[in-house]
Amino acid sequence: MLDGHADEISRLIEPGRVHRRVYTEPAVFELEMERIFARAWLFVGHTSQVKNVGDYMTADLGRQPVMMVRHRDGKVHVLLNRCTHRGPKVLNERCGNAKRLTCCYHGWSFDTDGKLLGVPVPEGNTATFQNDQYNLARAPRVGEYRGFVFASLSPTGPSFEDHIGPMKGNIDDLVDRAPDGELALDVGMHRYVYNGNWKLQVENVLDSYHVPFGHASTVNQQGVQFARREGDKEGAAVVEVKEKKTATSWKDRKSFIVGNGHGWTSNTELADGKRSSPAFDAYKKALVEKVGAVRAEEILKPRLHNSMIYPNMSIMGLNIHVRVIKPIAVDRTEVTIYPIRLLGAPDSMNWGNIRLLNVTHSAASFVQTDDLESFVRAQKGLRSLHTDWVDISRGLGAEDADPEINAVRGLATHELAVRAQYKAWLGYMQGAA
């Protein structure tokens, strides 16, 4: 049984390998809930999801239920979703609008900034009862960047700026694609659960090694994947068919890490000069009108494929969406996929992106189903007691510095990003030991 001491935790991670207990042992999972998900900066939601006064959305940060609500002054608050009387969740729906936040059990009602407004049958209160002693608890720390809201359930720790700073450019890369310079995550979601550890999904976000094999069914007889962006006639070359090997252009893609477990992969080589469709052409025209032709070409050049903001949120730059990863148990994980609407883009472009996302990252899609099958098989395989270690050594020692962007880089088919995630994992897990 894990005792949680720093030296014992350190024995689970070695250069280039991870002990199977990291994925399978309930005691490790319990420590993760305490030392990572109850303390780290976690993605909560996007301000577009609470656009109007009284709009709310609910989420779980680790095991703790929260609600993000827009108050009358326009500010967005992240409140703990627990009535201060007897403890029930105040809001049970995933999203909605309310003038007051009212507990179903005894009718206590709170304002949209968490202040207690009313207590039914107040004559039953003690003589010293004061409303302001029973306001809803707030997330101790909240940070926002370009509409992306994060919260930490710990009053202490690295600042939001220190946490998100290296990844601001990745968020900019996405938001700048909107002609109006704003995004909206207001067109529904895909949500599914798989029977596997949460870190399997986190690792997979920046794993390019698996694509020619795990997604073989998405590659045509010429070794090219199907088109995954509006306006493309075909996708990336993944396999060189004649040589029966992974395509050179795919192998040459890069991974980058910037500390805190964050990282990204460079984009695939695509025929951007040939990208055209009625929807894309209308979008490009709208973008040029807002930012100019030169800036529009910079924005439209694919730079980032996937970005991981550790530990619970990723951005897909190709089929544009935000993915949120929520651990439920050591062998059970919930994933939510939010399609992105580019404000100022023609409806035809936005709906085209959503249709493509249905094909690639819904629970019944061409791509996501492959990954989920791999996660489930991995969790089952890790039950074996005769091989203790999981190998993550690809590219170990081959990394080099990229001083221009203050990052460390390696090939995307290496496991540089996975090792960086476990460095952050170890820091969190030992930090409170």
Image (cartoon, rainbow, N blue to C red):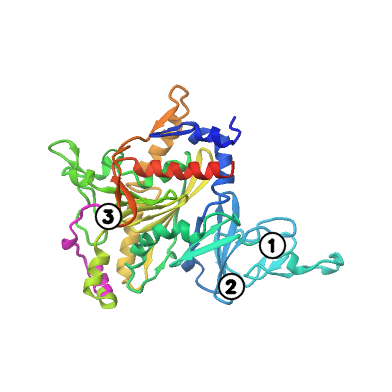
Density class for disc 1 (Cα within 10 Å; few <14, some 14-19, many ≥20) is many
Foreground of the two, 252 or 11: 11
Residue, far left: 242
Foreground of the two, 263 or 212: 263
* Residue drawn at 41 percent across, 38 percent down: 375
Mark 2 element type = loop
Q: Amino acid at mark 2?
A: His
What residue is disc 1 on? 103
Tell me if label 2 and label 3 are in contact, CB under 8 Å. no
State which mark lies toward you, 2 or 3.
2
* Residue 105 shows in this picture: yes
Q: How many marks?
A: 3
Mark 1 element type = loop
What residue is disc 2 on? 71
What residue is disc 3 on? 228
100 sits to left or right of 205:
right
* Residue 328 shows in this picture: no
Magenta residues, as a range?
267-287
Q: Quadrant of residue 395?
A: top left
Q: Main secondary structure of the magenta part?
A: helix
Foreground of the two, 150 or 240: 150
Q: Earlier in the sequence, mark 2 or mark 1?
A: 2
Mark 3 element type = loop
* Residue drawn at 24 percent across, 76 percent down: 292
* Residue drawn at 36 percent across, 72 percent down: 181
The image position of residue 47, as x and y in percent, is: 48, 67
Q: Earlier in the sequence, mark 2 or mark 3?
A: 2
